[in-house]
Image (cartoon, helix red, strand yellow):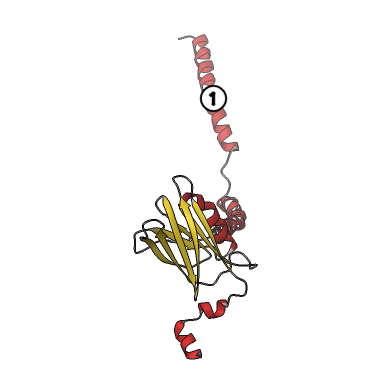
Amino acid sequence: MGAGSYEKQSIRVNARARPTLAKQNRRRRIRAPPSDLRMSIAMKPFRLSCPAAALVLGAAALGLSSAAHAVPTNPPIQMAPQGVEFMCGGKNKDEVAFMEMVAPRWAATFEFAVSRGPRGQFPEPVAVKVIDKYSGVEVMQASASGPFMLARLEPGTYDVQATLGNLTLTQTVNVALGVPGRALFLWPSNFDMAAATMPSQALAQGK
């Protein structure tokens, strides 16, 4: 083998070694940071994120609690002895708005009030009787625990009696398919509500 072949072989070896040397130089220039520097870099985002996370969680909890307080509890649906469902409510503004909203879905709405008195403020209880106007059959008997009572009555014509104390008011209500009936029972402003809502035992002792 001549000198020229050795020169060619050395050139090839150098050409192959150049990329390897370049990689080694790049590896030497890019060195991993010291362990203490890595720790400080890792800790900095955690320290900054803790207050932000606390603020986000606190705002979310506040939003959930305010939403829970904003949503009123719906009055329960009850069942009369005759098998008629009814619901009473309207003791505050939220309940009044709720009862007015759902009233079209019920067959009949009964409202109890005092003449010239504020709406939604009415003593309880009111004894309610619903009697079929033509057959005389009592289809519902219940106690209203609020200024509104909604009832799921069958289509027909009814005499509705609302009794508070010794005064009974009667209204005729017509219920048709898709057309709910409604009646307002208005007690006079000079009616003695305190005596009407007082237990009978207390009244007997007062006499």
Q: Amino acid at mark 1?
A: Pro
Closer to the camera in the image, 135 or 8: 135
Crowding around mark 1 (Cα neighbors within 10 Å: few <14, some 14 to 19, many 20+) is few
Q: Quadrant of residue 48?
A: bottom right
Q: Is residue 74 visible?
A: no
- Nearer the observer, 88 or 133: 133
The vertical placement of 190 against 160, above or below, is below
Residue 31 in view in this figure: yes
Viewport quadrant of the N terminus:
top left
Q: Residue placed at 42% from the left, 61% from the top?
A: 130
The answer to whether 141 is drawn above or below residue 14 in the figure is: below
- Residue 160 screen position, x and y as percent: 46, 61
Q: Is residue 128 toward the left or the right of residue 53 in the image? A: left
Q: Is residue 59 left or right of residue 142?
A: right
Left or right: residue 88 versus residue 58 is left
Rendered location of residue 101, percent (x, y) = 54, 52
The residue that mark 1 highlights is 19
Mark 1 secondary-structure assignment: helix
- Viewer-side residue, 111 vs 27: 111
Determine the residue positioned at 34% across, 61% down.
82
